[in-house]
Image: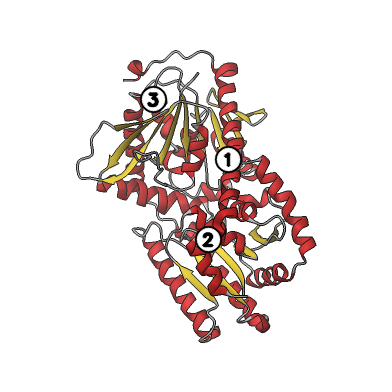
Amino acid sequence: MARLVIVSNRVAVPEEGGKAVAAGGLAVAVKEAFTAYEGLWFGWSGTITDEPSEEPTLIDRGRVQYAVVDLSPQDHLEYYAGFANRALWPIMHYRLGLGAFSRSDYAGYSRVNRTFARALAKLVEPDDIIWVHDYHLLPLAAELRGLGLDNPIGYFHHIPWPAADVFNSLPASTELLRAIVDYDLIGLQTEADVQNLQRNLVDTQRAIPLGGGSLMVDGRRTRIRAFPIGIDVAGFKEAAEKAGANKVVRETMAGLRTRKLLIGVDRLDYSKGVPERMEAVESFFASNPDQRGNVTYIQITPKSRSEVPEYEQLARDVNEKVGEINGSLGDPAWTPIQYITKAYPRPVLAGLYRAARVGLVTPMRDGMNLVAKEYVVAQSEDDPGVLVLSKFAGAARQLPEALLINPYDKFEVAEAIRAALYMPKAERLARWKPMVERMTREDVDWWARNFLAELENFRTVEHGPPTTTAAAAE
């Protein structure tokens, strides 16, 4: 059987006893992929050191070997905090005004991808299948091809792919589009993302459409398809059902008493629309004064990327908004918004989702948004809550029975909150059942199997037998 090599910016190396160290939602997806393959997971260790080794540290954990490399302070500043998160991230999320491009950051981004490729090429075997994840590593396949590797290489883009005019505003867009076609299979979250990338390649790279999502660019064939990522449905459902015994969940519910709960769970990022959502909640309470004291909104927002100036400002803005709303609407017996900046483990989140009458998932733009899916799966089949979901989240394509809203219109969001709170049980069940059935069919295992089957099919049908060895790559 072919070995699977997964490459991502961060690597979640399990501890000796098998306990996983979380590194975002990708860890769950990768774990599912490795259930069918022996493999290697390569990426950044999370450590910053003045003199990083050129050789990766290898850690064996059963069927999977982990290969991690450190970054220098300059690499981290330019590759990660700079180009990846101050240039690519805002552009991909249609936030042109927040994009900060510099040639030195782009040089660092290219340099780190080149360094990763050199370290990885020494570990790759001739029949390996390589699966690269996310925007940090767009040029990696091109770097690997330059070292002589002809293994099948797939790429999955977890965030949105914007319209051509938006992406082309990035000064490095042409180089990145040239590089991405060195992947044999490019996976995106939605058909809209697929169309955006295909049109961009046709318009700017003179790509020739071949049908079925395949394109020919300068004699090289690549395929672009939508593979909407799922969640661990069985595990999350079990966690929700058992969460009543969790201390944090019990204490939270006791504090609410008879109040209905609105919940939002997001990483602190301007794409998530947290301050805009708070304004919508404020509008809801302003237009529904009878609900003051009867409804509480809990917003769980762990901080992220605090080294990036835009995120520091966002944290200040959100804190000010919370204080303003609680100060103007609250009273000694009731706080409208409970704002929490610590991260909670899955059992706690599952229990809070299950307890919430309304799940507020209102990003301004999101590739998928797995919180929406987790909220649906966590609900009681006898008395489910209602999902209020941004139509600009990729999840909206799979969850059309949610109350879909425009997150830029706080009055529309406020009205959706009211509709959700007053929705009769029969309608809540009618909306919830098809969503949970769809999520159960299209879970994370379904996602990984489909992508890898497509990449395997490329190997057997189009690519032919492997011819390049790791030694040749050196």
| Above/below status of 64 relative to 403 | above
Amino acid type at image mark 1: Val
Please indicate whether residue 185 sits to the left or right of residue 148 in the image: right
Q: Nearer the viewer, residue 81 or 280?
A: 280
Residue at image mark 2: 265
Please indicate whether residue 254 sits to the left or right of residue 122 in the image: right
Label whose residue precedes the other's in the sequence (1 or 2): 2
**Residue 369 visible in this rendered orientation of the protein:** no
Residue 419: x %, y % from top left: 73, 69
Q: Residue furthest front?
A: 245
Front position among marks 3 and 2: 2
Residue 241: x %, y % from top left: 60, 54
Q: Residues within 10 Å of mark 2 (few under 14, many from 20)?
A: many
| Above/below status of 135 relative to 321 | above
- The disc placed on residue 444 is 1
Q: Residue at x 67, y 57 (%)?
A: 380
Q: Quadrant of residue 303?
A: bottom left
Residue at image mark 3: 146
Secondary element at tag 1: helix
Label whose residue precedes the other's in the sequence (3 or 2): 3
